[in-house]
Image (spheres, coloured by chain):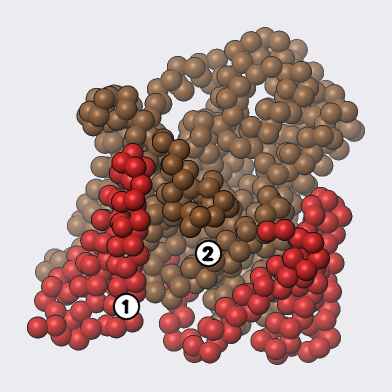
Chain colours: A brown, B red
């Protein structure tokens, strides 16, 4: 192991190794910032380039991308409410309100700090867990997936505060939208209006871009002025203050990192689910849950810690079994195979050097990309002071170009605009968009796991409560639902309670 | 007796109710396994919409519902509320996005981007011709360099110039 680590270090500390790492970091940051693109596209784009490289160099390039995409995505999520990548969507909820208060630098700093810590925890877990991964993955079957989806949906109950009912309605609309396309169990095509385009369901990236970026641009276009509200200030020290806050709120950071690593390691769930679960969990342990959505820094720290930690987690099944934990990992698997690396239990025996080069590059890129982000955060935060009549057309055109580029489907552009207008209507009528998004993401998983579980148990619904992991998750859901209520009861003064 | 009705939000509840009913009828046309969960969600939507509609009335039931399911604290949209925005401005903001998407579909990304940025800034944002032209040129060139040159993604050429949906 020591020899492999030294070989990996040697490949990093060469001019070419360092350049490939930097190239990966820069490409990752750019693809992260650009709405609609993301890590999968970046890895797919650079995969042919790696063919002529040594395996260690290829790992440095790929590790550079993987470690930096989410850092880039947090910038656009915070400053212009446009998630650079889908998992960054949860960062918008509190990051953007902070930017509107003139605290964009603080939010980016906190995101970078949490992202660094989360990334390192994810990688550390990867190193520790690879040998014992099989037994952990086998703990999760359909009933556990269903409970995980339900856990995400409990965010509906706790994240909407005073608008509980409209939050539930938005969640129901999100579930309805998630049913569009193939029924995952029987294969029936449903609710597509006869359009082939909708057979695979509502495409997530255009929907997210529309709901967050375009709807916000419409709202800004109506209101005029600047993103940062008049009188708000952006202190020069805010960026580093933000990074420090990730350490200060260590419970939120650690919790987000653990959720990101675990959820990232479960094939089929992915970073978006991890980020939303982290957001919900951060709210539940916060001393001020009522301020979530209005600019609570913990609402940035939780999802961002999870975002970077998920890469380490997602690599666990990818390397241990050759089962990609996400689309990004599926493409990365192609890179491994291209270089003659066969993922599986024998990987650490036959290709230890390559794996350590990858781990090392992930550590280095996590640090490098977040240092870059911290360095450029302050000038970037000035975007929030820009006249919206300049910002709006630039963001709208760039976002829609990114949405189109992802799949080269003109229908995606139309979808983004439709969701943009839907998002704006939701803002006007006080329906929270967060609950719609959570339900849209988790709806398919919940329905599929529900049917699979009942099929496994011949229709006996007690299967959800008779398996230990599933039962533990169920109890966590009940706890999650009760915590805000109990906290509210404890805090409500007697005279208010009687009103 | 029904007291005062908050028509704006009441009508939103009715729209949701209609969506729920239409979805229920539609879901019922599919085989059992494909329809089971959607039908359940449709009923939940209908019930929630009815409760929301009741909450928009100034009746004892409406007040009771409001007390249980809504409060003064509004979270996500608190800083975004623009309910007092003039309708003409709302329509104008939506029109510009709609016009851009139509232009993209007809003449393609690059010409549509240049035209949209220039016209939006000049007519909606009331910026100078120079500022509008410079931003339009910068944005269009930026998109072309980023997507077309650096990453070599073909940008939609427009239906009039050979693009397919």
Mark 1 lies on a secondary structure that is helix
The image quadrant where one finds the N terminus of chain A is: top right
**The C terminus of chain A is located in which quarter?**
bottom left
Q: Is residue B31 left or right of residue A356?
A: left
**Mark 1 sits on what residue?**
B11
Where is residue B94? Give x, y as percent. Answer: 57, 78
Discs 1, 2 touching: Cβ within 8 Å: no
Q: Residues within 10 Å of mark 1 (few under 14, many from 20)?
A: some
Instruction: Output the chain of dot 2.
Output: A
| Mark number displayed over residue A156 | none
Which residue is more in the foreground, A110 or A207? A207
Residue plotted at (32% across, 78% down): B11
Q: Chain of mark 1?
A: B
**Does residue A182 show up?**
yes
Question: To which quarter of the image does residue A150 belong?
Answer: top left
Q: Position of residue A11 (x, y in %)?
A: 83, 25
Marks 1 and 2 belong to one chain: no
SS class, disc 2: helix
Q: Is residue A338 left or right of residue A124?
A: right
Residue A195 appears at what percent x and percent y? Answer: 54, 55
Say above or below: B32 vs B117: above
Q: Considering depth in this image, is B110 or A303 the residue closer to the camera? A: B110
How far separated are the C-alphas under marks 1 and 2? 21 Å
Kindly identify which residue carries mark 2.
Answer: A419
Q: In which quarter of the view is residue A104 placed? A: bottom right
Residue B17, x across and y down, in percent: 29, 67
Q: Is residue A266 left or right of residue B14?
A: right
Name the residue at 69% across, 17% down: A342
Q: Residue at x 58, y 35 (%)?
A: A326
């Amino acid at each position: 192991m020591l020899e492999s680590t030294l070989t990996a270090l040697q490949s990093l500390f060469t001019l070419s190794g360092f350049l490939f790492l930097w190239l990966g970091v820069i490409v990752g940051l750019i693809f992260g910032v650009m709405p609609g693109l993301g890590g999968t596209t970046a890895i797919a784009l650079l995969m042919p380039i790696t063919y002529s490289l040594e395996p260690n160099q290829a790992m440095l390039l790929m590790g550079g991308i993987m470690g930096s995409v989410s850092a880039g995505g947090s910038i656009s999520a915070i400053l212009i409410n446009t998630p650079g990548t889908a998992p960054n969507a949860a960062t918008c909820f509190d990051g953007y309100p902070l930017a509107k208060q003139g605290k964009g630098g603080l939010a980016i700093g906190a995101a970078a700090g949490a992202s660094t810590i989360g990334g390192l925890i994810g990688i550390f877990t990867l190193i520790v867990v690879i040998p014992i991964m099989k037994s952990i993955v086998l703990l999760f079957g359909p009933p556990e997936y269903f409970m995980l989806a339900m856990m995400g949906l409990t965010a509906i109950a706790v994240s909407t505060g005073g608008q509980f009912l409209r939050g539930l309605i938005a969640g129901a609309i999100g579930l309805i939208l998630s049913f569009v396309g193939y029924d995952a169990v029987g294969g029936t095509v449903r609710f597509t209006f006869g359009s082939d385009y909708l057979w695979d369901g509502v495409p997530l990236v255009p929907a997210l871009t529309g709901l967050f970026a375009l709807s916000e641009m419409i709202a800004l276009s109506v209101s005029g002025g600047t993103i940062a509200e008049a009188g708000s200030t952006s202190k020069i020290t805010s960026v580093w203050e933000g990074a420090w806050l990730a350490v200060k709120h260590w419970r939120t950071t650690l919790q987000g990192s653990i959720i990101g690593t675990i959820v990232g390691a479960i094939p089929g769930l992915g970073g978006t689910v991890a980020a939303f679960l982290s957001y919900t969990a951060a709210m539940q342990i916060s001393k001020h849950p009522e301020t979530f959505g209005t600019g609570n820094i913990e609402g940035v720290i939780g999802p961002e810690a999870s975002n970077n930690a998920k890469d380490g987690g997602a690599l666990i099944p990818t390397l241990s079994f050759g089962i990609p934990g996400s689309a990004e990992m599926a493409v990365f698997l192609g890179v491994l195979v291209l270089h003659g690396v066969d993922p599986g239990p024998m990987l650490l025996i036959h290709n230890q050097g390559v794996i350590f080069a990858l781990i090392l590059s992930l550590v280095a890129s996590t640090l490098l990309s977040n240092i870059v982000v911290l360095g450029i955060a302050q000038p970037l935060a000035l975007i929030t002071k820009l006249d919206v009549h300049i910002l709006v057309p630039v963001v709208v055109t760039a976002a829609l170009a990114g949405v189109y580029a992802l799949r080269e489907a003109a229908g995606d552009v139309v979808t983004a605009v439709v969701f943009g207008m839907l998002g704006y209507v939701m803002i006007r009528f006080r329906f929270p968009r967060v609950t719609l998004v959570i339900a849209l993401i988790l709806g398919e998983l919940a329905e599929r796991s529900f049917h699979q579980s009942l099929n496994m148990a011949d229709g006996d619904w007690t299967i959800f409560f008779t398996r230990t992991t599933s039962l533990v998750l169920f109890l966590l859901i009940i706890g999650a639902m009760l915590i805000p209520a109990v906290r509210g009861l404890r805090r409500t003064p007697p005279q208010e309670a009687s009103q | 007796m029904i007291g005062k009705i908050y028509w704006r939000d009441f009508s939103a509840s009715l729209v949701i109710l209609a969506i729920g009913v239409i979805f229920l009828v539609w879901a019922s046309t599919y085989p059992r396994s494909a329809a089971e969960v959607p039908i359940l969600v449709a009923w939940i939507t209908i019930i929630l919409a009815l409760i929301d509609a009741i909450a928009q009335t100034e009746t004892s039931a409406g007040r009771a519902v409001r007390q249980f399911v809504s409060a003064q604290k509004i979270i996500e949209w608190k800083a975004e509320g623009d309910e007092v925005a003039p309708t003409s401005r709302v329509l104008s903001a939506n029109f510009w996005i709609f016009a851009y998407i139509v232009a993209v579909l007809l003449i393609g990304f690059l010409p549509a981007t240049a035209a949209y940025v220039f016209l939006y800034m000049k007519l909606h944002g009331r910026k100078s011709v120079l500022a509008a032209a410079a931003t339009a040129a910068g944005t269009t060139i930026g998109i072309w360099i980023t997507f077309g040159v650096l990453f070599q993604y073909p940008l939609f050429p427009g239906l009039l110039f050979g693009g397919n949906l």
